[in-house]
């Protein structure tokens, strides 16, 4: 049973950006995670966690650090798949005009 209880996806129309949408995820109806980015990579779409800029690069040379992140690999895969599935559904709705039906 998944602890992801809701996902909202907001598509972006900036053709110059690799970020195609933003997502908000609700966990167990008690925690909301905002600022997840759906990014079009060279080979596939992926989900990027919100990041903050570090005052100086870390020991690996990274200038940014995730604000939050899945602790286990299994949940990372579950979260990624759920967000990308919600993105696909949103794109289908926009293409078929279902967003404006009541």
Image: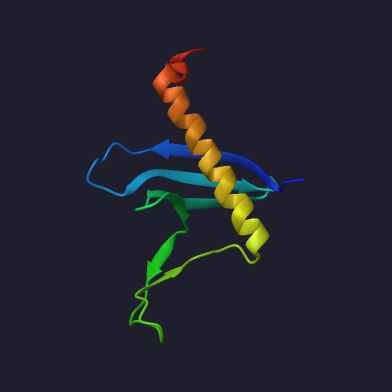
Q: Is residue 9 left or right of residue 75?
A: left
Question: In the current view of this chain or complex, which residue is farthest to the bottom?
Answer: 59
Q: Report the number of numbered marks.
A: 0
Direction left: furthest residue: 16
Residue lying farthest to the front in this orientation: 43
Q: Residue 65: x and y, percent?
A: 43, 71
Q: Does residue 36 appear in the picture of this structure?
A: no
Q: Is residue 28 visible?
A: yes
* Quadrant of res 100: top left
Identify the residue at the far top of this view.
Answer: 102
- If the image is split into quadrants, where does the N terminus sit? top right
Residue at x 42%, y 49% (from the top left corner)? 44
Q: Does residue 76 lie above or below 91 as drawn?
A: below
Q: Residue at x 27, y 48 (%)?
A: 17
Q: Is residue 98 left or right of residue 78?
A: left
Residue 83 placement, left or right of 39: right
Q: Position of residue 16 (x, y in %)?
A: 22, 45
Q: Is residue 28 left or right of residue 32?
A: right
- Viewer-side residue, 9 vs 17: 17
Q: Give the residue at x 60% y 58%.
A: 76
The residue drawn where x is 26% and y is 41% is 14
Query: Tell me, what colour scheme is on the image?
Result: rainbow
Residue 55: quadrant of the picture: bottom left
55 is higher (above) or lower (below) than 26 = below
Residue closest to the eye, 39 or 44? 44
Q: x, y (%) of residue 57?
A: 34, 81
């Amino acid at each position: 049973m998944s602890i992801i209880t809701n996902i909202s996806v907001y598509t972006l129309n900036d053709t110059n950006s690799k970020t195609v949408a933003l997502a908000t995820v609700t966990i167990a109806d008690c925690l909301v995670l905002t600022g997840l980015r759906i990014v079009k990579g060279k080979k596939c779409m992926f989900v990027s966690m919100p990041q903050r800029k570090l005052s100086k690069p870390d020991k690996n040379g990274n200038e940014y650090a995730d604000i939050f992140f899945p602790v286990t690999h299994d949940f990372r895969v579950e979260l990624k798949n759920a967000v990308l599935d919600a993105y696909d559904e949103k794109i289908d709705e926009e293409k078929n005009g279902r967003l404006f039906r009541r």
